[in-house]
Image (cartoon, rainbow, N blue to C red):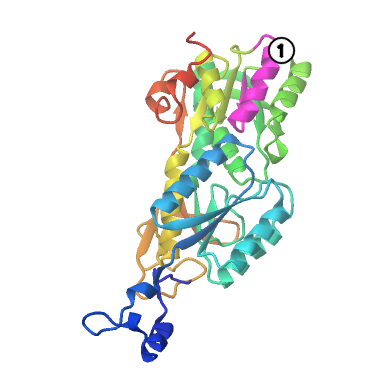
Amino acid sequence: MRKRSGKKWNTGLALLLCLAGLSGCQNASGLPETSETEQEERIQIGITFDSFIIERWQRDRDVFVSAAQELGAEVNVQNANGDMEEQIAQMDYFIQKEMDVIVVVMVASDEDESGLIEAVGRAQKAGIPVVAYDRLILNADVDLYISFDNVQVGRLMAEHMQEHLGEGGELLQVCGPMADYNVPQVMEGFEEVLEDSDLEIMETEYAEEWLAETGFTATGAYLKTHYEVDGVMCGNDSIAGHAVRALSERRMAGKVCVVGQDADLDACQRIVEGTQCMTVYKPVEKLARRAAELAVALAEGSRIATAGAAGSEPASSGNSGTDPQEIKVQGSIHDGTWQVPYECLEPVAVTRENMDEVITGKYHEESDIYLNVRN
C-alpha cells in the first residue's frame, strides 16, 4: 500500500536554480533556501454511495467528509444512483485518480456483484485499500468492513414487539432487499428472539432496491386477505412510514405495533404521535467518524488487526511502509470466502419513553420531533 510522505520537495529544480546563481537560492547564512519549494500533499479518499434516497446516507456523507477533512484528508464523493455498473465505473475512476483509500457503500440490487468484486481487486492490486461501509461486499476480501451489529438490530425489534404484544400475535415482515447483506442479518436476529415466543410471522415481503412504497402495497395486500395484523416489522423507517399510511387508511394506525430502523425524523415524529412503536437508532455520526479515522490510518500505512490478534496478517492489499502503526478493530467477519476485519458499533432501541434521552437534541431537535403534538 502506498504511503504519502506529507511533503514533496522539488530538490532537483532547487539545485539547478542554485547552480545558475539565482539570488533566491541563498539566505543570509549562505545556505540554500528550500521553504519555497515545500508542498503539502493531502490524503485523497474516494467514497461511492449507493444513492441518497435513504435519508441517513446524506448524514453519513456529511459527517464522513467533515471528519476526514479535520484529519487532513480530501474526500471525493460519488453517487451511483442505485446503479451497480455506475458504481464500478466510479471505482475505476478512483483507481485512475490514484486515491489513497476507497470507501464503498455498495449498491443494494439484484445485479451481478462479480464486477464490483473485480473492481475491489483492481484497487487492491494498485495498492489502494478498500473499506466496505455499512454493507459488506461478499467474497471481495475488503481491507475493512465497518457497520453496526445488524443481528442485534433484529433482536431489538423482536424484543420490543414481544414486550408490546405479549406472547401471542400475527406479524407481517416488510424487509429490505436480500441483495443488501444487512437484511438477512437483521432477519436472523429477529427470528432468533421469536423462536421462544408465540408471535408468528405470517408473511414476508421484500422492498427491492429499498423502494419505500413497498411498505404501503405489502401492508395493504396483506390486510385484504387477513383483515387484521398485530405487528409490522419494517426494514427501515421509510418502509414503516408507508406501512403506517396503509394502516391509517383502515383506521388501524396506532393499534398495530410497527417497528423500523434508522431513527429518521418522521419516524421519531410518528413514535411520539403513537403510530409507530419503536425505531432502532444507529449512531451514524460515530460510524462515519470512525470510518474516516480508519480510512486515514490506512492511507498513512497503518495495518488493520483484530483485537487480541497480535501479529495477525495485515489486510489483503498488504503494507509497504516501515514499521506501520497497527490499528485494532473488534473482530472479523466471513464474507463468504475470506475472514475480513470488522469494526462493529452497537445500535439502540428508541421508543416514546427514551426518545428525549437518546435522540432529542443529539440527533434531531425537540421542536422538530414534537412538531405535530405540541401546538
- Report if residue 242 lies within the magenta region: yes
Give percent across and percent down for residue 27: 26, 79
Q: In this view, which residue lies farthest toward the left?
A: 29
Question: Is 371 part of what is drawn in magenta?
Answer: no
Does residue 259 sit above or below 58 in this rendering? above
Circle 1 — which element?
A: helix
Horizontal arrangement in the rendering, residue 98 relative to residue 358 (left or right): right
* Viewer-closest of 31 and 252: 31
The quarter of the picture where residue 169 lies is top right
Mark 1 crowd level (few <14, some 14–19, many ≥20, 10 Å Cα): few
Q: Name the residue at 61% across, 15% down.
A: 256
Query: Farthest residue toward the bottom?
Result: 19
Residue occupying image coordinates x 59% and y 29%: 237
The residue range painted magenta reads 231-252
- Tell me the amino acid under the disc marked 1: Glu
Which corner quadrant of the image does residue 328 belong to? bottom left
- Residue 274 in the image: x percent, y percent? 54, 14
What residue is shown at x 43% (from left), y 59% (from top)? 296
- The residue tagged 1 is 249
At a point 40% along the width and 86% down the height, the residue shown is 17
Near-viewer residue (14 or 64): 14
Q: Position of residue 171 (x, y in %)?
A: 64, 23
Is residue 26 shown to the viewer in this render?
A: yes
Q: Can the viewer see residue 203?
A: no
Q: Position of residue 60 (x, y in %)?
A: 51, 43
